[in-house]
Image (cartoon, rainbow, N blue to C red):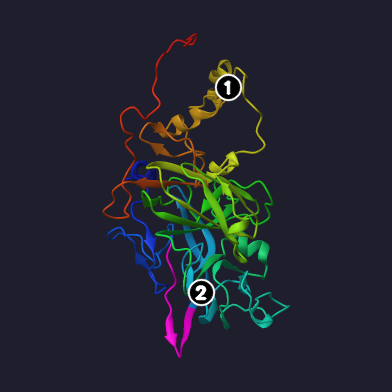
């Protein structure tokens, strides 16, 4: 079985099931019965991810992060040597509760020194994790311990402040979710997403940390669409999506099918008087944004970055513009030197996915095609930074329910094939 076969099957199914963690007590799979709305806290679901287990010692929650080189897969067809925590990039989500005392051991198995900065958390200066300023660097093989009390709730992040350009570009990052002890704004579904960008040159297996803007892979929690888990909710449920951004670009995150309010940043909850309805919110570099809404319309709704290049995979950024250029007469001559060659782009790039799906054009080694998504009506023509909010009237579980079937009379339909049609 080839990677192409695996990818095609997974495109049709997407990633079934959602991973979550109840009460911050370690990883759990959220595939049980749908929970009725209540005042109890909904389990956090880190798409394609997990939460970090902890131990209680003397009233302190102890976590252990291991910084190490890992093998990471964006989607079948592209794997890299990355750096991450506890075997993944992003690292596992750290969950705790406002007022908790936490003790976090950090073991360095990287080939160079590192530190960990607890982004957005108010703590003693010596725990802030800026190498050389707040602490000595954590040398290879060493373990350091950070200990502090979590005084505020909200969505925070962790990442190195040592050789940061390289280490963040290589994938070293994660989320910290601090739940309020008593939540005056409960939700029934709580999702967490960390945005990142990567420069993986065709045929290579390590990210290039020297690239500043021209990235070619855009990820949610280290995956590209359609390998990013969907967000499955029941109609009428209150939903929170937490979005962190440790990429080099700001991302205007756009939700179809609902109007939301931005209710929080990496400094905490926003007063209700400062919230207003939106469908697109800019998530700044180095910031987090929490959005909340009621899922009132059943269907499959896209959630994606509205920078169109960020919903595509590997692209050439310095190629001639072929739009409107008639190239087909050159195909026979070029194919003498490049067997199987034929031109693309005269009428747009939609044909790119058709050709790769039909194996007419192979991509370079270890390189994904620009678009891979499949829907019930054909190619979705997207990759990169996108997932799907799946809202259903009746759910027995939060496993992927498949694609939405629109009721009769509620789907756009063809009424003519005459280019000169007049209604």
- Pointers 2 and 1 in contact (CB under 8 A)? no
* Disc 2 secondary structure class: strand
Tell me if 356 is positioned left or right of 8 in this view.
right
Instruction: Please state which of residues 55 and 333 is positioned toward the viewer in this rendering.
Output: 55
Q: Which class describes the residues within 10 Å of circle 1: few (<14), some (14-19), or many (20+)?
A: some
Q: Residue at x 51, y 56 (%)?
A: 80
Determine which residue is flagged by label 1.
Answer: 346
Instruction: Please state which of residues 364 and 237 is positioned toward the viewer in this rendering.
Output: 237
Q: Residue furthest front?
A: 273
**Which quadrant of the structure image shows residue 360?**
top left
* Disc 1 secondary structure class: loop
Asked if residue 221 is positioned above or below residue 226 in the image, the reply reads below
Does the segment drawn in magenta span residue 104?
no
The mark nearer the N terminus, 2 or 1, is: 2
Q: Position of residue 163 (x, y in %)?
A: 68, 67
Which quarter of the figure is the N terminus placed in? top left
Asked if residue 417 is positioned above or below residue 81 in the image, the reply reads above
Tell me if 74 is positioned left or right of 188 in this view.
right
Instruction: Point out the stretch of residues depicted in magenta.
Output: 49-63
Q: Which class describes the residues within 10 Å of circle 2: few (<14), some (14-19), or many (20+)?
A: some
Instruction: Please state which of residues 260 and 48 is positioned toward the viewer in this rendering.
Output: 260
Q: Residue furthest bottom?
A: 58
Determine which residue is flagged by label 2.
Answer: 66
- One can see residue 178 in this view: yes
Q: Position of residue 78 (x, y in %)?
A: 48, 49
**Which quadrant of the structure image shows residue 109?**
bottom right
Does the segment drawn in magenta span residue 59?
yes
Q: Position of residue 176 (x, y in %)?
A: 53, 69
Asked if residue 62 is positioned above or below residue 245 in the image, the reply reads below
Tell me if 271 is positioned left or right of 186 in this view.
right
Total numbered labels: 2
- One can see residue 142 in this view: no
């Amino acid at each position: 079985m080839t990677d192409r076969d695996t990818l095609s099957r997974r495109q049709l199914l997407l990633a079934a099931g959602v991973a979550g963690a109840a009460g911050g007590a370690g990883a759990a799979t959220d595939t049980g019965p749908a929970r009725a709305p209540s005042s109890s806290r909904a389990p956090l679901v880190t798409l394609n991810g997990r939460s970090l287990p902890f131990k209680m010692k003397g009233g302190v929650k102890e976590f252990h992060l291991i910084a190490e080189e890992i093998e990471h897969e964006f989607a079948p067809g592209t794997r890299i040597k990355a750096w991450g925590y506890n075997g993944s990039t992003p690292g596992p989500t750290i969950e705790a509760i406002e007022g908790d005392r936490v003790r976090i051991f950090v073991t360095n198995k990287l080939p160079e020194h590192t530190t960990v900065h607890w982004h957005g958390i108010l703590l003693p200066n010596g725990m802030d994790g800026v190498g050389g300023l707040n602490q000595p660097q954590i040398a290879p093989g060493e373990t350091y311990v950070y200990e502090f009390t979590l005084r505020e709730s909200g969505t925070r992040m962790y990442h190195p402040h040592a050789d940061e350009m390289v280490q963040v570009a290589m994938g070293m990052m994660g989320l910290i979710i601090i739940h309020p002890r008593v939540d005056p704004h409960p939700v029934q579904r709580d999702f967490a997403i960390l945005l990142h960008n990567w420069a993986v040159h065709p045929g290579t297996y390590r990210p290039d940390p020297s690239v500043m803007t021209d990235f070619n892979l855009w990820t949610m929690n280290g995956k590209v669409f359609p390998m990013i888990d969907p967000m499955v909710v029941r109609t009428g449920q209150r939903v929170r999506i937490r979005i962190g951004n440790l990429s080099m670009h700001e991302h205007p995150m756009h939700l179809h099918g609902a109007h939301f309010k931005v209710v929080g940043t990496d400094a905490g909850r926003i007063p209700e008087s400062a919230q207003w309805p939106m469908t697109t919110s800019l998530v700044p570099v180095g910031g987090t944004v929490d959005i909340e809404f009621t899922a009132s319309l059943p269907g499959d709704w896209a959630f994606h970055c509205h920078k169109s290049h960020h919903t595509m995979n590997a692209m050439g950024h310095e190629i001639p513009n072929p739009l409107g250029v008639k190239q087909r007469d050159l195909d026979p001559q070029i194919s003498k030197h490049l067997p199987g060659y034929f031109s693309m782009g005269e009428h747009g790039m939609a044909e790119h996915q058709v050709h790769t799906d039909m194996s007419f054009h192979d991509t370079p080694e270890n390189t994904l095609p620009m678009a891979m998504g499949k829907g019930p009506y054909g190619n979705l023509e997207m990759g990169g930074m996108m997932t799907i909010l799946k809202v259903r009237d009746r759910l027995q579980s939060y496993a992927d329910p498949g694609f939405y079937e629109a009721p009769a009379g509620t789907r756009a339909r063809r009424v003519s094939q005459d280019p000169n049609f007049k209604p």
